[in-house]
Amino acid sequence: MNLQAYISSGILELYAAGLASPEEIREVEAMAEQHPEVRKELDAIQQTLEAYIGLHGVQPPAGLMGNIMERLDAPLKGRQKGKDSNESASQSNRSYEPRDSSEKSMASIATWILGLALLGACVAVFLFWRQADRAGAQMKAAQEQVEQVKKDCEAEKAKANEVKEQFIAIRHWATKPVQMKATPLGGDAFAVVYWNNIKKTAYLDVVKLPPPAADKQYQLWAIVGGKPTDMGVFDIGSPADSLRKVEFIERPEAFAVTLEPKGGSQSPTLDQMWVVGSVKG
């Protein structure tokens, strides 16, 4: 059984308000005994309902039960005494007192009935409030899920646009793939720079490089006029992230990748060069 659905069904509020059927009462008590979550929620509902009724409830007037019993006994006492045509006016006055008491009793009963109606209305409002509060929480959770889905869709759309842009750039007629092959240090390492002098774009495709140590990062260099130019550091991610846009450099002669301290270096560590490739080659 889905406990959250059971808790949200409204049966616990009916039980707390005394409006549940005998079958529902037995069911709620069994569920509360078996499941701490149901017991905790039921206790919270009962405390809230008691506080709510304490603020809005109406208690029966004092002595109401005695007045009702007196009203019920009056006809019997009248028959036992019989009719006496010789009773004095004072006796008539005494007969007026029960009528006055009766009127007060009826007024008390009416007040009590109105109080019960008000109490019932309070319970109804309480039940409605509980359901509305839960519905509001569910609506808020649904809205948050929708917002998260929208964000995910926007992120996927941005990623798709990026991939499309990369694909167009790589297939452009002026794009030149510069293969960077492994040095003796690199083993079977391999990477490619897609350089386009017309579109002024450059993309690095890390085909294979071993993961660096935690305090190290790979750094891309362009050799321009025989001097290295920093093109930024990069991390090794999943194959889907291997192609990344890098800074465009005018008139490069070659590209190379070295392993540097995390954050990069101002000049390449030549004995840590892993791949290198000539633009003309």
Image: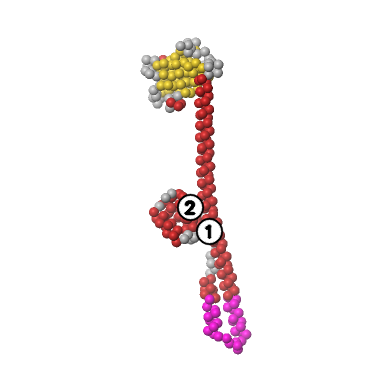
Inspect the image, locate mark 2, and give the three-letter code of the amino acid beneath it: Ser
Inspect the image, locate mark 1, and give the three-letter code of the amino acid beneath it: Val
Name the dominant secondary structure of the magenta segment: helix
Tell me residue 261's x, y (percent): 42, 22
Tell me residue 129's x, y (percent): 54, 53
**Spatial CA span between label 2 and label 1:** 16 Å
Q: Is residue 47 visible?
A: no
6 vs 235: above or below: below
Q: Is residue 93 visible?
A: yes
Mark 1 crowd level (few <14, some 14–19, many ≥20, 10 Å Cα): many
Q: Nearer the viewer, residue 74 or 213?
A: 74
Residue for badge 2: 9
44 vs 195: above or below: below
Tell me residue 163's x, y (percent): 50, 26
Q: Residue furthest bottom?
A: 86
25 vs 97: above or below: above
Is 102 magenta? The answer is: no
- The figure's colour scheme reads secondary structure
Residue 269: quarter of image: top left
Q: Secondary structure at mark 1?
A: helix
Residue at image point 53% right, 45% down: 139
Mark 2 crowd level (few <14, some 14–19, many ≥20, 10 Å Cα): few
Residue for badge 1: 123
Q: Secondary structure at mark 2?
A: loop
Residue at image point 47% right, 61% down: 21
Give, as a single range, the part of the protein colored magenta: 72-101
